[in-house]
Amino acid sequence: MEMRKLGNTGLSTAPLVLGGNVFGWTADRETSFAILDAALEAGINAIDTADVYNRFAPGGQGGESETVIGAWMQDRGVRDRVVIITKGGLPMGEGLEGLGRDYLTRACDASLRRLQTDHIDIYMAHRADPATPVAETLEAFQTLIDAGKIGHAAASNYSAGELREALAAAGEDKARYAVLEPCYNLAERSGYEGAVEDLCVEQGIGVIPFFALAAGFLTGKYRSREDLAGKAREMTAASYFTERNLALLAVIDRVAARHGATPAQVSLAWLMVRPSVSAPIVSATSLAQLRDILKSIDLRLTRQDLAELDL
């Protein structure tokens, strides 16, 4: 399995990053442990999560995903075999949000406790904070790096302008973002392709896209809004039902049929051949889903496939 560098971090990962957003939500502890075991056995060594997972779910408080991952690492004794990526900054309660120096430090410490580790490999600003000067945020990240609490600072959901400003502000006492986590997939391309992608390539930023399967839309299991009714991803996946994207599903089906593959495998294989992408993030709520996802690593799309998918 080809290993890929995460920007200028020096860290290597498999072509896929395991998404932890489902742990403690649509995957219970036992299922989550089984998925984590199987992914690591298959060579998937990077896990992405966030402190806010799964605060958005009914009954969720936040921290559930990190807690499950921490318990798994402790139980299996595998901390030194995995790259842990987590995020802070989104609301975790009254007065608990943002990228200010004081709160970012407390948020990191809380994540370390839940993860049962003394360091986070890549710690991300979950989104830009207009209320905090970027210099303050980067100074806070550098303090965490100097303390050995995090290995590298990174960002998620940043626009080209926000990322450019942060990179320009980096310096001797201010951390430099090494990785970006954008929303990017076959059905949603415009937010990343262009200015953001160009900047990442120019500056050597690692890229690990989230929503690699468009909240399940690109798996092909949702062919109408009615298929989504009552599903955990109903609100998110519904936005993908456009004329263009429904036509895209038909193309993905055709490509998948040529290779004896599934729509999910084709969608992930397309992301993995994008030159600027280090590794897409993908989640699984069952071992069957994980096995399907892993097959995408060996799928080789042809030039004809790529041309047809480029709607």
Image (spheres, helix red, strand yellow):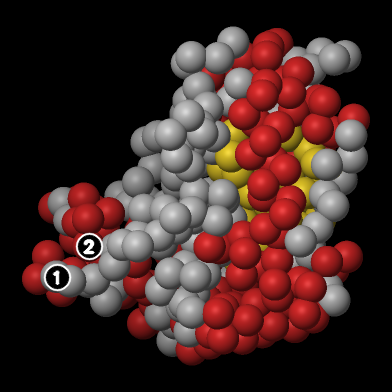
The residue located at (45%, 47%) in the rendering is 184
Q: From the viewer's perspective, is 188 left or right of 45?
A: left
Q: Nearer the viewer, residue 159 or 185?
A: 159
Image coordinates for residue 118, horizontal then vertical, percent: 84, 52
The image quadrant of residue 44 is bottom right
Tally of marks: 2
The residue type indicated by label 2 comes to Glu
Closer-to-camera residue (55/282): 55
- Dot 1 amino acid type: Ala
| Residue 41 vertical position relative to residue 132 in the rendered view, above or below | below
Residue at position x 71%, y 59% from top?
115
Q: Quadrant of the N terminus?
A: bottom right
For the residue carrying disc 2, how many other residues have a C-alpha within 10 Å: few (<14), some (14-19), or many (20+)?
A: some
Q: Would you say 35 lies left or right of 188 here? A: right
The image position of residue 153, as x and y in percent, is 73, 34
49 left or right, relative to 202: left
* Labels 2 & 1 near each other (Cβ < 8 A): yes
Question: Residue 10 location, x and y as percent?
Answer: 87, 45
Q: Is residue 124 above or below residue 256?
A: above
Q: Position of residue 36 (x, y in %)?
A: 65, 77
Residue for badge 2: 234
**Callout 1: SS:** loop
Residue that lies at the very extreme toward the front in this rendered image: 94
| Res 107 → quadrant | top right
- Which of the two residues, 264 or 162, is positioned nearer the viewer here? 162
Ranked by sequence position, the earlier of labels 2 and 1 is: 1
Q: CA distance from mark 2 to mark 1?
A: 6 Å
Residue beneath the point at 26% across and 58% down: 237
Taking the view exactly as shown, the residue that stands out farthest to the left is: 226
> In the rendered image, which residue does mark 1 sit on?
229
Secondary structure of the residue carrying numbered label 2: helix
Residue 285 visible in image: yes
